[in-house]
Image (tube, rainbow, N blue to C red):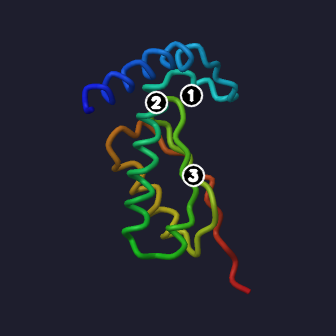
Amino acid sequence: MEFKLATFCLVIVAVFSPLAVQAQDTSTDGDRTHPVTFVKDSVITTKIKAKLADEKMSSLAHIKVDTHRKGAVVLSGKVRTQEEADQAVSIARETEGVTSVKSKLHIKKED
């Protein structure tokens, strides 16, 4: 029974692998065309988001993190203070694999 299941899975993988290789990337990001680069960038983004969430500051948890071109990070969103913006940039820079950090963070004005 296990042999039949393993054989079935192997056949499915063999049939659909060429389709996955032939699939065309329709995104406009040039850095997303290579799967390995996309995975590495996704790992960097996830690491930064986890570190920001660990800081227990609500505004840091709402920062958008986007990673492009092999480790180039862009932070965007709103924070309460300049210190929080600086802290977010510092966290991103200290993350392994990050080559540069661009901040598009805005200070949220109190009502």
Q: Secondary structure at mark 3?
A: strand
Q: Secondary structure at mark 2?
A: loop
Q: Amino acid at mark 1?
A: Arg
Q: Which label sits in the foreground, 3 or 1?
A: 1
The residue under the point 47% across, 62% down is 86
Q: What is the distance, in whole Å, between disc 3 and disc 1 at their CAs?
A: 21 Å
Q: Which residue is mark 3?
A: 103
Location of residue 64 in the rendering, given as x and y in whole percent from the top left corner? 58, 56
- Front residue (pair 25, 50): 25
Q: Amino acid at mark 2?
A: Lys
The residue under the point 46% across, 41% down is 42
Identify the mark nearer the N-term, 2 or 3: 2
Q: Quadrant of residue 28?
A: top right
The residue under the point 43% across, 25% down is 36
Q: Amino acid at mark 3?
A: Ser
Q: Which label sits in the foreground, 2 or 1?
A: 1
Q: Is residue 103 left or right of residue 43?
A: right
Identify the mark nearer the N-term, 2 or 1: 1
Q: Which residue is mark 1?
A: 32
Identify the mark nearer the N-term, 3 or 1: 1
Q: Which residue is mark 2?
A: 70
